[in-house]
Every structure is written in C-alpha cells, then in structure tokens.
Image (cartoon, rainbow, N blue to C red):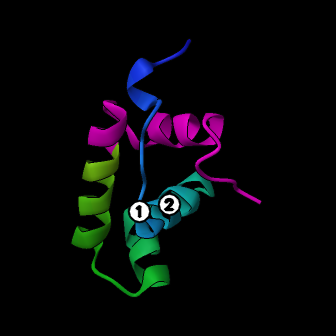
Amino acid sequence: MEFAVTLDIKLTPREQEVLVWSGRGKSSWEISRILACSEATVNFHFANIRRKFAVGSRSVAVLLALEKGLITLC
C-alpha cells in the first residue's frame, strides 16, 4: 500500500532519533532518558511525526519511515 502523503516527508534529526528508538522497542519514558529530555518533549515529537505521516500510531509511523528509507534500525 502506497501513501501519497509520505512522498515529501521531512523529518528533523530529533524526530528520526525518536523513531529509531521507538522502532527498537523503547517507550516514551525510556527515549526521554536516552535523549536527556522530558517525556512530554518525546510525545511532542511523536505528535509531529504522526501528523507528518497522517497516521494515528507511532508504530505505523516507524514502519512508513523504514519503508521510505528515512530511518534504519541498525
């Protein structure tokens, strides 16, 4: 399934970091500890990411970012 809305998505470096850690199974709280920021900041990034991908969940955003080559989990 191809989503036209994902063609020109630009993620900030921090959004990419948040998605990578999420893809590795980390929660918002864990990501906040890793990135030395608040959990609210991590959730703010996720809200922006979901808006950019026009999806309702972070897991779908991770999958689309992987599919589009915007992140890698290696």
Verify whether residue 56 appears in magenta. Answer: yes
Q: Nearer the viewer, residue 65 or 36?
A: 65
Q: Is residue 28 left or right of residue 74?
A: left
Q: Residue at x 27, y 79 (%)?
A: 38
Q: Quadrant of residue 29?
A: bottom left
Q: Is residue 41 left or right of residue 62?
A: left
Give the amino acid at mark 2. Answer: Gln
Q: Which residue is mark 1?
A: 12
Q: Residues within 10 Å of mark 1 (few under 14, many from 20)?
A: few
Q: Residues within 10 Å of mark 2 (few under 14, many from 20)?
A: some
Verify whether residue 53 appears in magenta. Answer: yes
Q: Residue at x 42, y 41 (%)?
A: 9
2 and 1 marks in contact (CB < 8 Å):
yes
- Residue 44, which numbered label? none
- Farthest residue in the right direction? 74
Q: Which residue is mark 2?
A: 16
Q: Residue at x 53, y 43 (%)?
A: 62
Q: Tag 2, which secondary structure? A: helix
Q: Nearer the viewer, residue 25 or 12?
A: 12
Task: Look at discs 2 and 1 and give the one toward the viewer.
Answer: 1
Q: Position of residue 10 (x, y in %)?
A: 42, 49
For the residues marked 2 and 1, what is the alpha-carbon distance in whole angstroms?
6 Å
Q: Tag 1, which secondary structure? A: loop
Q: Nearer the viewer, residue 74 or 2?
A: 2
Residues rendered magenta in the picture: 50-74
Q: Residue at x 31, y 60 (%)?
A: 45
